[in-house]
Image (tube, helix red, strand yellow):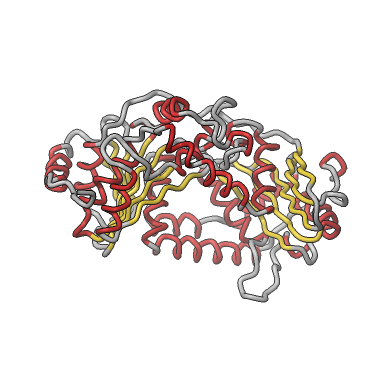
Amino acid sequence: MASAVSKTPMLRAAAARGFAAQTQAAAAGRGCGEAQCTTLPNKLTVASAEPNAAVARISIVYRAGSRNETAENLGASHVLRAAAGLSTKTATGFGITRNLQQVGGSLTATGDRELITYTVAVTKDHLETGLKYLEAAATGQVFKPWELADLTAMLKADIARVPVEVQAVEALHKAAFHTGLGNSVFCPKYKAGKHSSETMQHYVAANCTSNRAAVSGVGVDHQLLVGFAQSLSLDSGAGSESKSNFNSSEIRHERGGSRAAVAVAAQAVGWNNMKECLAYFVLQAAAGSGPVTKHGGNNGALTKQLGGVESSALNSTYTDNGIFGFVVAGNGKEVGQAVEAGVKGLKALNVSDADVARGKAVTVACIADYLENHSTLAFDLGEQAALLGQVYGKAELLAAFNGVTTSDVQNAARKIGSSKLAMGAVGNLSSVPYLCNLH
């Protein structure tokens, strides 16, 4: 029957394995008892928090985002997240859907430039069912050719729905990094439907390995989660991401219509420089990340100079690199003027004590709100575990952001002002200046 679930006492066995492995695993608890992290001998990292949450959310995270694609398999990460829930070695796509629906659970897959995350959410009394189908979806992919062919329409629909502002940011990444971090999180149109079963199996084998993975959970006992992680059938691997160097260049996609979107940025820092990285987050909030009320103004230190167009400061941080700048969108004629004003503002970006105080307040509030939501907390734990190999608790993170000084933020602003720029532009670009003419 399609609705039959495993009678194997997975949770009891997993918990037993977890407790037995305590002496073998390298455990590191972070924060004020609010997050736990364990690194297994096979380099798989396990992180958990809030064990008493009403709904259990468990994620299996891989460092298999689009930065790991090559010219031959561009778009593979997009196909991988779209294929979540299709037939696996132990379950059919119908079986996964039917059984999770029957217990009120859900299975989702998300991805970005660095990570692919599979997450199941179920009530605690159905945790065994949720773990069974999470394991099937995240570790047992088979990529049947006819199922991949059926994904083509979904891929094309995803590509068609990408907003022009996101297209500009994607073009900016391509201009800034070329390959690696320059690879789009969306499959190129010309590659939609062209990924074979062999291509996808090779991509999974190269990137979904124990040393490139993490398991995170909210609403589940940590030792039980450790036992579940140990039971996963993951190959070991020695691969690592190639470095992406910043380049000063531009990519322009001329389109019809009257609207345009432009993203401009300089090189920032990555997570490997944590202290400086925090200063860039505060600088983004101080520079202006959008109005805080429905019809409010965008009065950041940078965005207030950009006129009547939609605008926001941009800060994208990755393991070993990052970009900081701004995004503007609106009528093509107005966007051109806003870009010129934005570049001048970026080159002379200066923040006062009041700007930094406001930026810290906004950042701390956003972080606190993000980590109090169990859905986003589960994702954050997985991201930290997979990228950093450890996790920071809420109290620890908030203390770190509160410790950022005006001097730290001003130093970050000066570095941006003296750096070369990259640009991505999409739409009616008749009035948008070329990068070489922006000073």
Horizontal relation, residue 255 to residue 125: left or right:
right
> At 60% from the left edge and 62% from the top edge, which residue is drawn?
359
Q: Nearer the viewer, residue 177 or 33?
A: 177
Q: Which of 215 and 387 is in front in this view?
A: 215
What residue sits 76% from the left and 60% below the top?
330
Residue 35 appears anywhere in the view:
no
- Identify the image quadrant of residue 286: bottom right
* Image position of 216 (left or right of 261): left
Q: In this view, does 353 lie above or below 71?
A: below
Q: Is residue 383 left or right of residue 194?
A: left
Q: Where is residue 183 in the image (x, y as percent from the top left)?
A: 60, 36
Which quadrant is the C terminus positioned in? Answer: top right
Above or below, 168 against 174 in this view is below
Q: Position of residue 92 (x, y in %)?
A: 30, 42
Left or right, residue 348 beside residue 140: right
- Where residue 349 sits: x, y (%)? 74, 54
Query: At x 54% / y 61%, what residue is drawn?
Result: 363
Number of labels in the image equals 0
Q: Residue 294 appears at what percent x and percent y?
A: 63, 75
Residue nearer the viewer, 104 or 68? 104
Viewer can see residue 184: yes
